[in-house]
Amino acid sequence: MAEQITTVTVQGVNIRLHRAGKGPPVLFLHGAGGVPVWLPFFDAVADGHDLLVPEHPGFGGSDDPTWIRNIGDLAYFYLDFLEEMRIGSYHLIGNSLGGWAAAEMLVRDRARCLSLTLLAPAGIRIKDMPGGDLFIWNPEELQRNLYYDQALAERVLATKPTDEEMDVILKNRFTTTKFGWEPRWHNPDLEKWLHRIKLPSLVVWGEDDKVFPAAYAELWKERLPDARVLRLAKCGHLPHVEQADAVIARVRAFLKETAR
């Protein structure tokens, strides 16, 4: 399915928006890698839905305003984004950093959201069970640690980025550091407010995730009022990429189940 790429302005910030499909809106919030390619997962979700995939402020082709300083600011920004786009009820999907932002959004305002899907989200932590440290891994270590299937990592590593693509990678990394550096990849106050997300929730995790251990899925299930968990064998930190067929089937069923 062909994506359309446009620029929208929210609170004076220009955001690059990838969009496809027709139907009930689904907002997808990406992880630390940005939106480098249009994924088969996106095509599947856009089949029957209006899928919106914005590039976060400070990522890719979006502006980098100085006043968005932390994940809470990003959450409020996306609540403004929904208003600017005149979106009523919607489904929310977030991966990693984007999953953290999604949860921060909904503890603030869940009124129009129909469902939440979290794909290996950041945001909370289990004491004495640290995840991997993206900030100390070199580029090769990072790619290898994202995937269980090293053939996928090899494919990414074999592609040499252009100068323009390298600029985007560095921009994304700088903004990721702003959001995730201290404290590492979580908000100590988020866990105690997750009870406010009184929505059907789906938590998807790869059993071989080296970024955030799969055991974190159970803590999300405990803290969210209405959560179910899908854990996938032979899968790393990007389940919607590495186990796309299984994740697509479950997410599409979940969106249908929670539709109005």
Image (cartoon, helix red, strand yellow):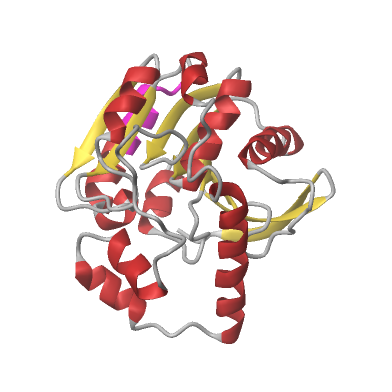
Query: Is the residue 208 above or below the residue 155 in the image?
Result: above
Residue 89 visible in this rendered orientation of the protein: yes
Image position, residue 55 (x, y; %): 61, 55
Task: Name which quarter of the figure residue 241 lies in.
Answer: bottom left
- Looking at this view, name the residue that lies furthest to the left: 233
Location of the N terminus (image quadrant): bottom left
- Looking at this view, name the residue that lies furthest to the front: 128
Image position, residue 102 (x, y; %): 53, 35
Query: Is the residue 77 above or below the residue 57 in the image?
Result: above
- The residue stretch that appears in magenta: 251-260
Image position, residue 40 (x, y; %): 36, 57
* Residue 258 magenta-highlighted: yes
Image position, residue 242 (x, y; %): 26, 57
Nearest the eye: 249 or 154: 154
Q: Is residue 251 left or right of residue 42?
A: left
Magenta span main SS: helix
Query: Is the residue 136 above or below the residue 55 in the image?
Result: below
* Residue 91 magenta-highlighted: no
